[in-house]
Image (cartoon, rainbow, N blue to C red):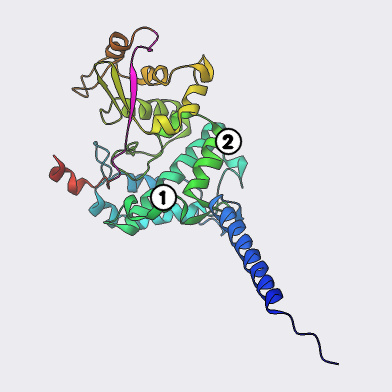
Amino acid sequence: MNAPVPSPRRTRWLAVVALLAVLVVLAVGAGLYVGGALPAPVPPAAEPFGYTDYAQALSHVRPSGDLDFEGLLRDRAALERFVASLAAVSPHRQPELFPSPEDGLSYWINAYNALVLLQLVERYPDGVDASWFGGFYWGHAWPVGGERLTLYALEQRVLLGEYADPRVHFALFRGTRGGPRLDGAPYQPEFLDAQLNDASRRYMGDARHVKLDDKTVHLARLFQDRRQDFLAALPEGRGGNVLQFVWAFLPDTCEERPGCDTRGDLDRACGPQLDRCRIDFIPEDTSLPDAANTAARR
């Protein structure tokens, strides 16, 4: 007896169901990948974990925050060694090596910034703008202590999800000239609080991020995108004004950065409650922070 032949309508329905099932599997897999929920092999550690190689790579950061890519390319092996060391060791896998929150947070900030640096070196002279739809931050994953992490997962799930210190936003190098500056030394647990304060002050003292114009304060888009994080850190909580957070890290004088705005400037323009000013959010300069191009931009 011959088996019944499926009708064309049933065949089309089965094809649609199969296609939907494939799309669901792909979407779930992509979500796990971007969110850093996939495992990664853990190689044996070649030597005790440390930041010496990373410090060597950071020696090519100029005082302006721009990068000497010619020198960094010469020291690429040191940067690659440090990134390779992340695969074997992390606070998640060996918490005994990172006994304090400062130990863990220093590790994750350095890991994030080193991975951004490595991507820039690998793509040079292209920068973040060469990736579509923000793919620079989620399009590649690295093995980190048994996890396969994208930059997005490192920032959202680990750095902000586990530590919730808004100063971290100013310590994370985004690979752009208009974003937070890369420091010339690794973050260290014994100096972390001071280093995070310094990173915040550098950011606030830069006219590209905070600029007072009569009764309007021009702020970097970061303050809009992460507004709730900054407000949550204020004594008033989320009912406060983001300018209160800005005020806390503005300089008292502009001796080191002529032309910057100070706490006194903000007080005089915006009043003691900082509520008399209008806030205008400005876009970030996403060009590559290449020291070779600095002179051409002046």
Residue 217 in the magenta stretch? The answer is: no
Q: Quadrant of residue 275?
A: top left
Question: Please, is residue 53 above or below residue 7 in the view?
Answer: above
At horizontal 24% and vertical 40% (from top left) the residue drawn is 62
**On the picture, is 171 further left or further right than 294?**
right
Q: Nearer the N terminus, badge 1 or badge 2? A: 1
* Residue topped by disc 1: 134
Disc 1 from disc 2: Cα separation: 23 Å
Q: Kindly state the secondary structure of the residue where label 1 is placed.
A: helix
Q: Residue furthest bottom?
A: 1
Which range of residues does the magenta coloring cover?
273-286
Q: Position of residue 190 (x, y in %)?
A: 47, 30
On the question of residue 136 being in view, the answer is no
Quadrant of the frame with the C terminus? top left
Residue 275 in the magenta stretch? The answer is: yes
At horizontal 62% and vertical 40% (from top left) the residue drawn is 96
| Near-viewer residue (260 or 99) | 260
On the question of residue 249 being in view, the answer is yes
Quadrant of the frame with the N terminus? bottom right
- Type of residue at label 2? Glu
Question: Please, is residue 67 above or below residue 3 in the view?
Answer: above
- Type of residue at label 1? Gly
Q: Residue furthest right?
A: 1
* Residue topped by disc 2: 162
**On the picture, is 24 further left or further right than 221?**
right
